[in-house]
Image: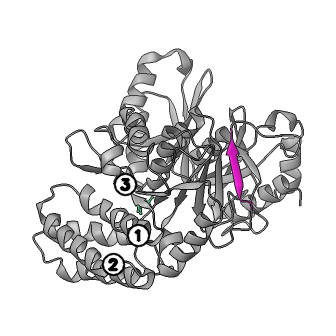
Amino acid sequence: MSSVKEFWVNKFGGTSLANAQQIMKVRDIVFADERRKIVVVSAPGKEHKEDTKITDILLSCHRLIEKGQPFDELFSVVRKRILAIAEALNVNQNKMGKELDAIYVQLPKEKSANYAGSRGEYLNAIMIAEAFDATFVDSAEIIFLTNKGQVDEKSYDKVAQRLKNIEGRIVVPGFYGTGEDGSVKTFSRGGSDISGAILAKAMKATKYENWTDVSGIYVADPRFAVNAGPVANITYSEIRELATIGASVLHEDAIAPVRSANIPINVRNTNDPTADGTIISETRDIKLANLVGVSGKKPYRKVVLEKYMLNRDNSAKKAISNFLEHNNYTVDVVIEAFDTMTLFIYGDLEEKDLKLINEELLKSVESCTISDELVLIGVVGEGLANEKELVKRVSNKVDVPFEIISELSPIKMVLSFALEDYNTALNALVDLVVGK
Ligand code: ASP
């Protein structure tokens, strides 16, 4: 490590490592550039759509154990997959067999699901380190999590201390570390992205390459939006805004560590390493595009409450928010005017919820109107303010009724549509953003 001036952290997701063939692609990528020094790996993911991720199988083992049921059969699925990878990679199968035996013995002794959930990354990293002739460093030694599942700041020093003198490549399992009680603790699902970001910051990497199975961040989810292609550049803020309205590309908590250290993230495709992917950084050239992304979240209900001078009636407002909080309703948007308050409640609400909301809120206001199910779609871009004619352009482009919720952030405009118009609206907005 010490001999190399510039280096990158590379994180590979579960589909990039689903089998030995994928791992060999990763090997080619890593060996193609000597700056690819630190490799963070997920557990083997899905080879085919209908497969189950190793992480999920391990978590199911833990659930069986909790219920007092045998887990041998399920664990043998993990064993088989790991040993098949080991064999194809020419990795010591005996050693992997022993690792699997130790996990099999330990699983019933663990109270929480964290240990089980983490073992896919652990096993995969050991195999990949051997196959890449690299040093394996267990993340339990260097990454620490708070009780809330967030990174403990002391991790940065621990990482730097442990890795700084290692020569050659290093492979670190993603997704977990050590919790405050000293036992293995995982981040939330998809958390290997966070591990990669922590390592990048701790080691002062010049780039964080995040390798997945798509060629970067798309203008919108390409499964639903025909003309959505990858974007070359996007800012951290734009990514955040897209995430709050449904887009999921990177784990949300993976942005903060690299952002504070000003390290760009490059999202790339293991299956198409020639594609440049997307660079996520603090700024981008908005002259090239004012807007970059569209994403939608559903279902929502719009609840309009009316009462004379409602905005000054603190006890009514308090009763409303207490009720919503108490019943765990997710209110994503609140718009207050003099005599009205409009709420957008996220999630599947049943008839009994609608009745309860109506009855309870009518105790504080004069009228309460609840809409049919809606989808909120956000159009995001650092150049939003330059799009003076945007509403007019949206009206021309989108053939279905919509309502503007507001510009909830200076870089995001949110619109609401009837649920059945989701696809039409999404495609029209994507076309508007990509200039079709
Ligand atoms: N293997 C974990 C998951 O499936 C973590 C990750 O892949 O980032 O969520």
Residue wearing tag 2:
92
- The yes-or-no answer for disc 2 within 8 Å of ligand 1 is no
Identify which residue, 167 or 310, lies in the foreground.
Answer: 167
The quadrant in which the C terminus is found is bottom right
- Quadrant assignment for ligand 1: bottom left
Label number found at residue 130? 1
* Residue type marked 2: Asn
What residue is rendered at 71% in x and 54% in y?
Answer: 278
Residue wearing tag 3:
137
* Residue type marked 1: Glu
Dominant secondary structure, magenta? strand
The stretch drawn in magenta includes residue 280: yes
What distance separates the C-alpha of mark 3 from that of mark 1? 12 Å
* Residue type marked 3: Val
| Percent x, y of residue 17 | 49, 71
Range of residues picked out in magenta = 276-281
Q: Earlier in the sequence, mark 2 or mark 3?
A: 2
Vertical relation: 390 (above or below) 269: above
Check disc 1 and report its element: helix, strand or loop.
helix
Q: Earlier in the sequence, mark 3 or mark 1?
A: 1
The quarter of the picture where residue 190 lies is: bottom left
Check disc 2 and report its element: helix, strand or loop.
loop
- Whether tag 1 and tag 2 are in contact, CB under 8 A, the answer is yes
